Image: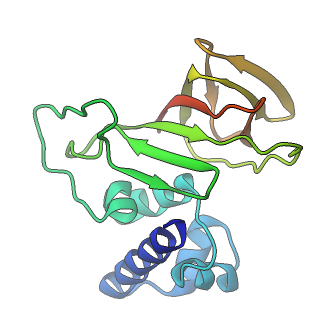
Amino acid sequence: MVEDQLKQIGERLRGLRDVLDIPIEEMAETVGISVDKYEKVERGEVDITISNLMKIANKYGISAEELMFAEAPHMKSYFVVRNGQGMSVERTKAYKYQSLVSGFVNHKADVFIVTVEPKPGARTIYKNTHAGQEFNLVLEGKMELYIGGKTIILNEGDSIYFDSSKPHGMLAVGDKAVKFLAFTVE
């Protein structure tokens, strides 16, 4: 399942590059990775972060949802997502993103429910950066959040607002998945 989604995202990235005649070097530079690694992303062999998909989407004037889900937003007045029904993508076996704004045209923020599975014994946190700011609200479980050299424990009901240009990442704490609302805006 995850491998299929990675391949589909890679195909959409390759299609975008082909349609807009974007050199592969430019795409790799946009997301700050080597050409070799970017080629692996397009082949679906390596994952690409949500923030890197957002960088590509913003630069080339499309929605991140089109790259993630192959769906273009259509709603202009409002967009309702019923409980558990938002478009979702499993980024890896440990991360699942459910979009809550995917159907709204020209949305100003990206809002996801993110579920992170625990990795017993894991101490390495993959860090990410993207322009703008981010708000996280823990809905279930407990997470360890790393932001720019600090580690913060967030419990159910806790929230944090931060500068997302600072390196940040998280781990689920304990033996239960953590589910949180992630709201990003540039």
| Residue name at image x 72 percent, y 38 percent | 170
Which colour assignment does the render follow?
A: rainbow
Residue 146 is situated, as x and y percent measured from the top left of the image, at 78, 34
Quarter where residue 20 is shown: bottom left
Q: In the orientation shown, which residue stands out farthest toward the top?
A: 157
Q: Nearer the viewer, residue 160 or 98?
A: 98
Q: Nearer the viewer, residue 152 or 86?
A: 86
| Residue name at image x 89 percent, y 43 percent | 121
Q: Is residue 18 above or below residue 73?
A: below
Left or right of 120 in this view: 17: left
Q: Is residue 125 above or below residue 155?
A: below
Q: Number of callouts in the render? A: 0
Q: In the orientation shown, which residue stands out farthest toward the front?
A: 175
| Residue name at image x 77 percent, y 45 percent | 119
| Residue name at image x 75 percent, y 33 percent | 175
Left or right of 179 in this view: 172: right
Q: Nearer the viewer, residue 46 or 18?
A: 46
Q: Is residue 128 above or below residue 143?
A: below
Q: Nearer the viewer, residue 149 or 145?
A: 145
Left or right of 63 in this view: 138: right
Residue 21 is situated, as x and y percent measured from the top left of the image, at 37, 87
Quarter where residue 179 is shown: top right
Residue 180 is situated, as x and y percent measured from the top left of the image, at 54, 29
Residue 19 is situated, as x and y percent measured from the top left of the image, at 30, 84
Q: Is residue 122 above or below residue 53?
A: above
